[in-house]
Amino acid sequence: MLNSIKDFFTLDVIYQFANIGVIPFWLMLVLLPSWNGTKILVNSVIAPLILGSLYLYVVYIYLNTSEGLFSNALDKIKTFELYKGLESLKKILADKNILLIFWIHFLTINLMIGAWIANDASKSKALQFIVIIPLVLTYFLGPIGLCVYLILRILAAQKLKLFD
């Protein structure tokens, strides 16, 4: 059975599933931030659990692609080479498995940041109407959307707590 699952869930299918799969969550954040369904599906563990499962599966595929299960795992874990510079990072990302792992990581973190932004904005009536801009920016550009939201939050609420 694992071979049939592996044959179906190719890296390209997982990539498409992850990309298309996050869109409904983002639409809920933008269009229906206060809806209970959004709170259940996006602001809970469900979305990160789905994306985390994809992430784990791709890591499994990556560690299992050599001669046997987890063969040369220590060599493959040398992906910490990415800290040596951009050329090392480029070399590591040339592997489709690692590239997909990084992409799912990016999608997951951005969605979690988007959920935090939508949840935080719901506490302020001033932010509820302008939160769409930082959410769209967060979807496409991650930290820039968060930065824009935090600036808007400072301007609208005229305060920013370090811990909230």
Image (cartoon, rainbow, N blue to C red):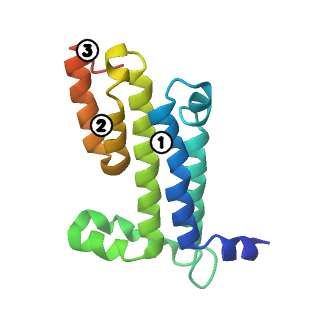
Give coordinates of residue 45: x percent, y percent: 58, 37
Quick one: SS at disc 2? helix
Query: Which mark sits nearer the N-terminus, 3 or 2?
Result: 2
Q: CA distance from mark 2 to mark 1?
A: 15 Å
Q: Which residue is mark 2?
A: 146
For the point 31% across and 36% down, which residue is it?
133
For the point 54% across and 45% down, which residue is it?
24
Q: Amino acid at mark 2?
A: Leu
Query: Which mark sits nearer the N-terminus, 2 or 1?
Result: 1
Quick one: SS at disc 3? helix
Q: Amino acid at mark 1?
A: Trp
Q: CA distance from mark 3 to mark 2?
A: 16 Å
Give coordinates of residue 3: x percent, y percent: 73, 76
Callout 1 crowding tier (Cα within 10 Å): few <14, some 14–19, many ≥20: many
Q: Which residue is mark 3?
A: 157
In front of the other: 101 or 38: 38
Whether label 1 touches label 3, CB < 8 Å? no
Give coordinates of residue 115: x percent, y percent: 45, 34
Q: Which mark is residue 26?
A: 1
Residue 70 higher or lower than 42, as above or below: below
Quadrant containing the C terminus in the rendered view? top left
Callout 3 crowding tier (Cα within 10 Å): few <14, some 14–19, many ≥20: few
